[in-house]
Image (tube, helix red, strand yellow):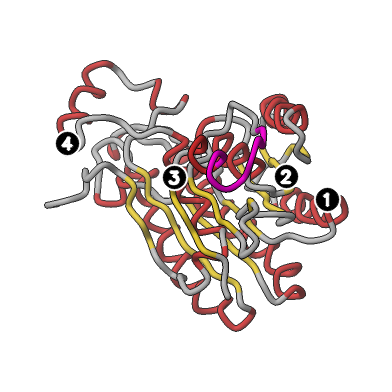
Amino acid sequence: MAPVSYTMTMINAREKFIGPLIFPPIYAIESIILSEEGGYKMRLKDKVALITGGGSGIGAAVARRFAAEGALVAIGDVNLQGAEAIALEIRKNGGRALAIKVDVRVKVEVSGMIDEVVKEFGRLDILINNAGVTRDNLCARMSEEEWDFVLDVNLKGTFLCSQAAYRPMRKQKHGRIVNTASVVVRGNMGQINYSSSKAGVIGLTRTLALEYARSNITVNCIAPGFIETPMSAAMTEKTRELALERIPLSRMGTPEEVADLHLFLASDEANYITGQVIFLDGGASLGI
């Protein structure tokens, strides 16, 4: 019989099924899987996950959540200090984590990152392509450098990481890749470079899903809306007010809510899902 899934509060789960297990308080674990024997089963137990841009914001939330679910976590980030801080936090809470400095625009660095992960952990099961940047400007004023930088990090970086991850995943005949698009693929003034890069990520996701399926590798994409991150913190108060007016749920999302969706798509519960783009935006894309 297959494991049975239950969703309940951690307290109820512990009292009814598990006993006095202790979880790091920083992790909000609400969804658990119970084995036939009734014991706790982590959803990513011993899986090796690489998160790019994992030193802050959404990437950091994903790294924490995956570690809490038993994954061995590698954090790739151009900001090594940020990546090391999250890795240290995970290790202090009893997990295994590795920090790697990487510029996802550079093929040799990306290949080196994948090699380092496989050398450290022996395999690579999950790739979360989360690294991303913005350089906002109106099209008429945008420089070639602003255009190139955003496309190189957001789109080329996703391509290079997905290409390099294919080697170990193909050898294993199993893998999960989750890319990052954005609600602004539907258009947003002043972000022609960003929206174009994220639209490209959607096309890349669907094509890779077709190409990688024969190796039992699923490729999906999350398109977040307005999320409380260091990137959104740079918004002016007026821009924030206008953004909230467009969200039916009347609030911004949290990195932890995005991490929840990443967890599902990276888990065995999503075995038959590939080539999909899921908008996580509080309903902002409805009616557009």
Do the residues under discs 2 and 1 have CB atoms within 8 angstroms?
yes
What amino acid type is highlighted by mark number 1?
Answer: Glu
Q: Number of callouts in the render? A: 4
Mark 2 lies on residue: 74
Tag on residue 116?
1
Few, some or many residues within 10 Å of mark 1 (<14, 14–19, 20+): some
Quadrant location of the N terminus in the rendered image: bottom right
What amino acid type is highlighted by mark number 2?
Answer: Ala
Q: In this view, does 263 lie above or below 1?
A: above
Tag on residue 21?
none
| First of labels 2, 4 by sequence position | 2
Measured as percent of width and height from the top left, residue 283 is found at 22, 45
Few, some or many residues within 10 Å of mark 4 (<14, 14–19, 20+): some
Q: In this view, does 232 lie above or below 174?
A: above
Q: Can residue 100 be seen in this view?
A: no
Question: Real-space Cα distance between discs 4 and 3?
Answer: 32 Å
Q: Can residue 81 be seen in this view?
A: yes
Q: Residue at x 62, y 40 (%)?
A: 63
Kindly give the residue lying farthest to the left in the view shown.
287
Q: Which mark is nearer the camera, 2 or 1?
A: 2
Question: Real-space Cα distance between discs 3 and 1?
Answer: 38 Å
Q: What element carries label 4?
A: loop
Magenta segment: 14-22
| First of labels 4, 3 by sequence position | 3
Mark 3 lies on residue: 8
